[in-house]
Image (cartoon, helix red, strand yellow):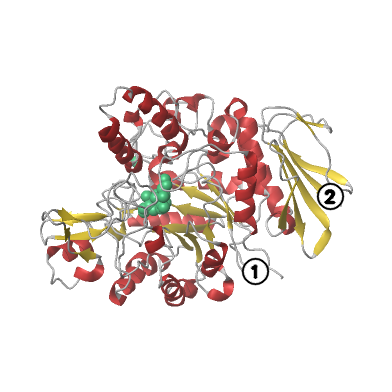
């Protein structure tokens, strides 16, 4: 099968999370003028597309994923004029800009919801999902079913005013929109999508793109965590009965008319289900993010469930995410960090060999098939928050709700301190806060992120890990990223479009794979990555002429891979 080569396929995308990127006016919050001031830096890094996380007006209960007005920029980030300047300046440099599209829910401060909540007979009542309470034999009020929120507790919120519950799969201030209503869908397309496409943006990262179609019978979810009152509702809310109808409508009514790039966030899918969203002939979205790699070692159902991982678990996940499109007309993504994930060096690398393992992960990411996504700060090897910080430094609603629930449950236990320490180990490893600390631009106070007081604490290691100290250093993580992106483009037939095959799968220290170009099967990319703290023997697992193209150490000893050493060979 020949793969069509649309512009978004070989693109390198850089995700910006505005609050923590760059503050231009000293109020401690990142902003759009701050982003504009770094466009040359991004261009120089090799970025083709910028993905800007929500910059819309919002009460910021979930850092902008709770939108109160799709058509207005959050005032602390700037104005609509600033956005227009960002769009234009990005285009002037030959780059593109995509925005986050958050349309499973709005903020409860959105006028649509305010109207909907006002009375049972309001014309927007069924723009959201309202249900009467359930009463038990003693007359106690309960939510309509046992669905749990992603952010702990019930997914239903009781509203005194009309005596009904509304569905909110995330925070209580994030009511789910009712996609069954055609008028609502049209309003979403106009306000959230066309408004910005008409101003020149180039596409969307589509938030929670698998959740729009809920099982209209609203049955109880099956019980996966017997100790919990509320259960994850995936089987009734993810990949629902009308989800593909909705995506096809969105494509034909909106995105196809603008040549917009679309990348959906759709987790927990079989291969068959995933392909329905991204197969070209289905005409839905260009690509989706799969969750197998980033959930390695995680326990399903529990936000902070963690059980550790082995290299073969990791290989299996990469294999699944990378090969699911092989032999099809679909496309996929490569990513290991985003605003919901911890820093990859801490989670998957070896922190004793931080910069070495950051480069190793760079080599991995830059040689995998699909559109490449890098998250702000990843290019300089930013790390998780220090373990010594207390829960008070954590700002994410997901972390805070979980911690509160934990404290309610175990707070009076005699060994609470011990339990809390264990939880803090996990929070420190996987919490979303880890990727939300400000970008470290230089070694001045607060890492050059702001001249004022940052809204959230800057990682103490900014004096050693920052952009300014890396930019002219040929051995830095940043320089390694830059070179890796160049090589990825230069050898795109193999690295971006090639097929993927793991060699010596059972090896728990070394990850070896080859990339092949179907049209030119003789030439291969051979990638070998030592994911261990030890030096290991290097053996060529295939025949042919090996040419070393790229590697993350200065002196290469042919027969030995030093800790976290990685190499990319071209084999003829
Ligand atoms: O994330 C959806 C989602 O499934 C996550 O909540 C995920 O389960 C969680 O982050 C794991 O820790 C999207 C956005 O990426 C996220 O930032 C938002 O909070 C969420 O939607 C609600 O809009
Ligand atoms: Ca600011």
Quadrant for ligand 2 reads top left
Q: Horizontal and vertical percent for residue 382?
A: 52, 34
- The residue singled out by tag 1 in the image is 328
Quadrant hosting residue 184: bottom left
Name the residue located 66 percent from the left edge and 38 percent from the top edge: 360
Q: Which quarter of the picture shows residue 551?
A: top right
Q: Name the quadrant containing residue 470.
A: top right
Q: Is residue 548 left or right of residue 328?
A: right
Viewer can see residue 33:
no
Q: CA distance from mark 1 to mark 2?
A: 26 Å
Q: Is residue 138 left or right of residue 97?
A: left
Q: Residues within 10 Å of mark 1 (few under 14, many from 20)?
A: some
Left or right: 213 with respect to 362?
left
Quarter of the picture holding the N terminus: bottom right
Task: Tell me the residue at 33%/23% (across/down).
Answer: 415
Q: How far across and down, in percent of the image, does residue 331 sit? A: 60, 64
Mark 2, residue position: 571
Of 164 and 232, the residue lying toward us: 232
In the image, residue 122 sits, relative to residue 376, either above or below, namely below
* Residue 180 percent coordinates (x, y): 32, 73
Residue 339 on image: x %, y %: 44, 45
């Amino acid at each position: 099968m020949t793969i069509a080569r649309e512009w978004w396929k070989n693109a390198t995308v850089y995700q910006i999370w505005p609050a923590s990127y760059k503050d231009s006016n000293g109020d401690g919050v990142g902003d759009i003028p701050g982003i504009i001031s770094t466009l040359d830096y991004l261009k120089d890094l090799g970025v083709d597309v910028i993905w800007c996380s929500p910059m819309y007006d919002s009460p910021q209960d979930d850092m902008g994923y709770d939108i109160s007005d799709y058509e207005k920029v959050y005032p602390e980030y700037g104005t609509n004029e600033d956005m227009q300047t960002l769009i234009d300046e990005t285009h002037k440099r030959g780059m593109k800009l995509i925005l986050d599209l958050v349309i499973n829910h709005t903020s409860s401060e959105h006028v649509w919801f305010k109207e909907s909540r006002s009375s049972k007979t309001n014309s927007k009542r069924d723009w959201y999902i309202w249900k009467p309470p359930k009463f038990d034999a003693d007359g106690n009020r309960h939510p309509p079913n046992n669905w749990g929120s992603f952010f702990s507790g019930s997914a239903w919120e009781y509203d005194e005013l009309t005596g009904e519950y509304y569905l909110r799969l995330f925070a209580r201030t994030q009511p789910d929109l009712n996609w069954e209503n055609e008028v609502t869908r049209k309003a979403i397309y106009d306000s959230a999508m066309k408004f910005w496409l008409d101003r020149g943006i180039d596409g969307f990262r589509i938030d929670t793109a698998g959740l729009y179609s809920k099982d209209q019978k609203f049955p109880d979810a099956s019980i996966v965590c017997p100790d919990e009152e509320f259960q994850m509702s995936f089987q009734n809310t993810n990949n629902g009965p009308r989800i593909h109808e909705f995506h096809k409508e969105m494509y034909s009514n909106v995105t196809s008319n603008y040549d917009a790039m679309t990348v959906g966030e759709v987790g927990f899918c079989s291969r068959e289900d995933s392909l329905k969203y991204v197969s070209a002939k289905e005409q839905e979205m260009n690509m989706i993010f799969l969750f197998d790699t980033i959930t390695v070692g995680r326990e399903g159902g529990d936000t902070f469930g963690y059980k550790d991982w082995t290299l073969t678990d990791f290989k299996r996940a990469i294999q699944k995410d990378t090969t699911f499109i092989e032999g099809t007309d679909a496309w996929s993504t490569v990513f290991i960090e985003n605003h919901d994930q911890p820093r990859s060096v801490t989670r998957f690398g070896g922190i004793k060999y931080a910069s070495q393992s950051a480069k190793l992960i760079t080599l991995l990411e830059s040689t995998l098939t699909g559109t490449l996504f890098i998250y702000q700060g990843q290019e300089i090897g930013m790390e998780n928050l220090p373990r010594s910080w207390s829960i008070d430094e954590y700002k994410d609603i997901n972390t805070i709700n979980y911690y509160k629930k934990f404290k309610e449950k175990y707070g009076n236990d005699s060994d609470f301190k011990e339990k809390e320490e264990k939880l803090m180990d996990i929070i420190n490893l996987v919490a979303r806060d880890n990727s939300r600390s400000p970008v470290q631009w230089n070694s001045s106070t607060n890492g050059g992120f702001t001249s004022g007081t940052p809204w959230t604490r800057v990682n103490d290691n900014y004096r050693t890990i920052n952009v300014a100290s890396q930019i002219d250093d040929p051995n830095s993580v940043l320089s390694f990223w830059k070179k890796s992106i160049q090589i990825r483009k230069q050898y795109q037939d193999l690295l971006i479009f090639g097929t993927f095959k793991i060699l010596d799968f059972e090896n728990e220290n070394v990850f070896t794979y080859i990339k092949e170009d179907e049209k030119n099967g003789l030439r291969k990319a051979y990638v070998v990555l030592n994911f261990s703290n030890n030096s290991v023997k290097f053996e060529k697992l295939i025949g042919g002429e090996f040419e070393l193209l790229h590697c993350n150490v200065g002196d290469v000893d042919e027969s030995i891979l030093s800790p976290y050493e990685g190499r990319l060979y071209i084999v003829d």
